Every structure is written in C-alpha cells, then in structure tokens.
Image (cartoon, rainbow, N blue to C red):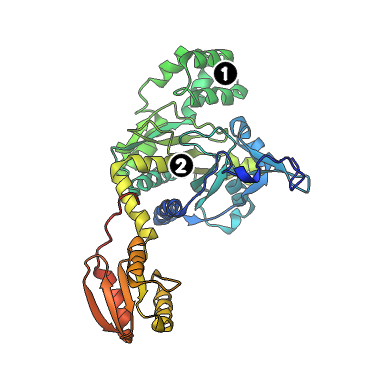
Amino acid sequence: MACGPKGEDRFPMATFRTVKGFRDLYPEDCASRDVILATWSRVARRYGFVPYEGPLVEATDLYRKKSGDEISAQLFCFEDKGKREITLRPEVTPSLARMATARQRDFRKPMKWFQIGSCFRYEEPQEGRSREFIQFNADIIGEGGPGADAELVALAIDTMLAFGIGAEDFAIRLSNRQVWTDFLTQQGLPEDKHPAFLQVIDKIQRAKPEVTAQKLSAIGISHEQVLAFMNQDFSEHPAFAALAADLKARGLWSFIKLDASIVRGLAYYTGTVFEVFDLRHGLRAVAGGGRYDKLCALISDGAVDLPAAGFAMGDVVLGILLERTAAAAKQHHEAVLAALQSDVFVIIADEARRPEALGIVQALRRSGLRVDFSLSPQKVGKQFQGAEAQRARLGVVVGSEYPQLQLKDLISRQQQLIDASQLQPAVEAALATAPSPPLIAGA
C-alpha cells in the first residue's frame, strides 16, 4: 500500500486508535516495563552474561529459511524502497547466530550473551499474546556440553525467583528433542517428516485429541503410540542424566518436571528443550528455549559450526503472572512506585528566592538525586500536594529566611532547620534513614 496522503485512508483523523496488537505505555506502564527490564539485566549479569543488540529488521529469508514454517506465517514482512524484502524481527536467535558466526574468532568461548528488545509477530492478539512484545534472550554459544543447558535453566529459575514468583508458583517443563528423534527412527518415519510430526507434538496439549489423531495418522504414526511413549518414566533416560546431576548439585532439580510434550515449535532446536510454566493460572509459557547446535552452520552456509543454546522470556505473559501472584504483585508494585517517586521536592515559599531555589535544585540533581519543583508560582500548600503526589521522601522549603532552609520528612512529618551550605549532607543522611513512602491505593 502506498504511504503518504495518497494512500488508502484507513485511520481517519477523528478515530485514531492504537494499532491492533500494539500498546500505549503511559508513565506507570513504562515504570513497570523498566522494573522488568532491570530485573532481567541484573540477573543475567549476575550469571556472567554480557549484552548485545541486533537490528529490528532483517532480510526476510533469514527467517523463512532458518526458523520453520510456523514463524514464517507470522512475519511482519514488507518491501523497502530499494525493493528488498525485509521483516521486523519476530525473534532474535537468527540475528544472534548471524552476528556470532561473523565475528566468532574475536570472542572467547563460550560466548554468554543476553539481549532485551522488541519483537513483532503478526498473529491474533489474545491474553498473553500481542503483536509487539519485549523479549529477554539469553544464549550460550560455543559450548556443546550439558553444563550450558543447566546454566540456562538455572538462569531462568533465578530470574523467576527475582520477580518474587516462588517455587510453588512455577515449574520448568523439560524435554530433549533427541528422545523424539530416537522414537521416530524406531518407527521408521522418514527424516523429512520429522518437522511436521514435531509441530503436532508442540500443540498436543492445546489441540483436540481427534484433531491430533488425524494429523498423526496422516504422517504415519498412531495417536496411541505417541501417548504410550509420552507417558513413560523418563527419569532414568540417558538424555537427562548429566543435566539432572548438574541441577541437583545446584539445588534446583525440584523445579524440574520432565515432559516429553515440550518440543518447541521452531525447526532449529536439536537437543534439550524447556519451557517455564506457571502452576496456578493456566497461562501460556512464560519462557522457553533449548539447544540449537545446527543453526550457526546453517546461517553461515557451513563456514562456522558452533554449538549453541538459549532461551527467551517475553514481558506480556510475565506481566500477567506478576499481577496474579500475590507476593510478586506486591514486590513489583512497590518497585514501580519507587521508580515513579522523587527523592526531594523543593518548595519555593518566597518567589523572591526562586533563583536560590533553582540553584539548590540543580546542585541536588548533579549529586544524583531525583529532584522536582513547581515550574510556576504556586501556593505552598499546592506545592506540598505536588510533593505528596510524587511520593517525594523529603521536602526542602526555600523561603524568606534563606540561607536558612527547612528540611521536612514528608513521611514522618519531622522537620529541621539547616543552613544552605549543609543541605547536601543533611539530605543524604535523611534519605539513608527515611522509610519508603506508604503505598497509594489505586496507584
């Protein structure tokens, strides 16, 4: 469709709305997002991961050829002005593989990288799904052993715990694609039919049994054979032995549930696969990933062959889970309110002293504090209301007594007179001891 005024007018000026599947983020929403992103980053860095970033758009063929049919049907793809077909990234792993293979000699192995950014998928919006979402990606490249798989599972667990989501609220459903490869080999299913079979298994818990049976029959395997295989005890299966030993040593095996139905829909997975599920609310998977040892070779046309594993966690399902899990909701709400509050609000009680007050504002800001004030003259009572609306912890009153200032604790209501030259240490001392402002109902 043409751009500009001559294009089809689908959005008349009087009816502009958010495009379907996208979100407006108001200040409180941005504060919530920033708390989530900061938590992701903090835990990843604690594990020794370092950040990277790729482009928001890639050549469409990168996803068509490397990610399988399911994601290809969800692409936001278009032709640019140079007649090139490009796509808003639906995921980041193909970009990571492209970047890693391009400069893999410059980095010590294993490469433990993480990324946080927007992704786009053209699918029907519903609870837990939107067309734009923010995703946390953590990957280990250049290590083919089970230690890398265990490290990623441990990172996923600790990330959930960091949000206040307890062991009783979520589990890691763990499987291994090799288990299914062995099964299909025993059944004599040709390798070119394996991807279609795995697509059926990926949806087996959500699809109607009769639909699953029909699809499996078309591939050449009975529903009964698949159910019998899935219901066996995999606890002693050699595919999980080393990974289980590692996670048991970390004290994390209690979070794991072996589940052969977890295969992950994307075509590039090759070994261990896992998903993070909540145990109380029936939500979609909070996170998922696994081993994809062949992707780097595919991306580089065989020039670079690096083992790799990783997982991704999106903000949409996580945000719903944070709202519905009591302890996590309280922790997150407090963090959001803290992100929105000021440290100090400067109250100008005498407009003749506004120049001195502005100097105080800038000096406190340069020291790293969050400081606000009334941009235009207001009654002192109105200014205090503004301070309380921002949940400021301290008020500094600049009046006719300057250089004497009034430093007021807006929580305890205690106050003291101090000289302007002593304001900085007095503020720092007060902030070090002042309790957090109370929660505001409905904030």
Query: Where does label 2 land, which residue?
Result: 316
- Specify the amino acid type for callout 2: Val
Q: Residue at x 23, y 75 (%)?
A: 415
Q: Residue at x 34, y 51 (%)?
A: 333
Quadrant placement of the N terminus: top right
Q: Toward the viewer: 174 or 313?
A: 313
Q: Which badge, 1 or 2, comes first in the chain's sequence?
A: 1
Q: Image check: 395 left or right of 286?
A: left
- Specify the amino acid type for callout 1: Leu
Horizontal and vertical percent position of residue 442: 33, 49
Q: Is residue 97 above or below residue 353?
A: above
Secondary structure at numbered mark 1? loop
Q: Image check: 417 left or right of 293?
A: left
- Disc 2 residue crowd, few under 14, some 14–19, many 20+, Cα 10 Å: some
Q: Image check: 81 left or right of 303?
A: right
Query: Where does label 1 land, which residue?
Result: 189
Q: Image check: 421 left or right of 362?
A: left
Horizontal and vertical percent position of residue 398: 34, 80
Residue 66 quadrant: top right
Report the number of discs: 2
Residue 171 quadrant: top left
- The numbered mark at residue 336 is none
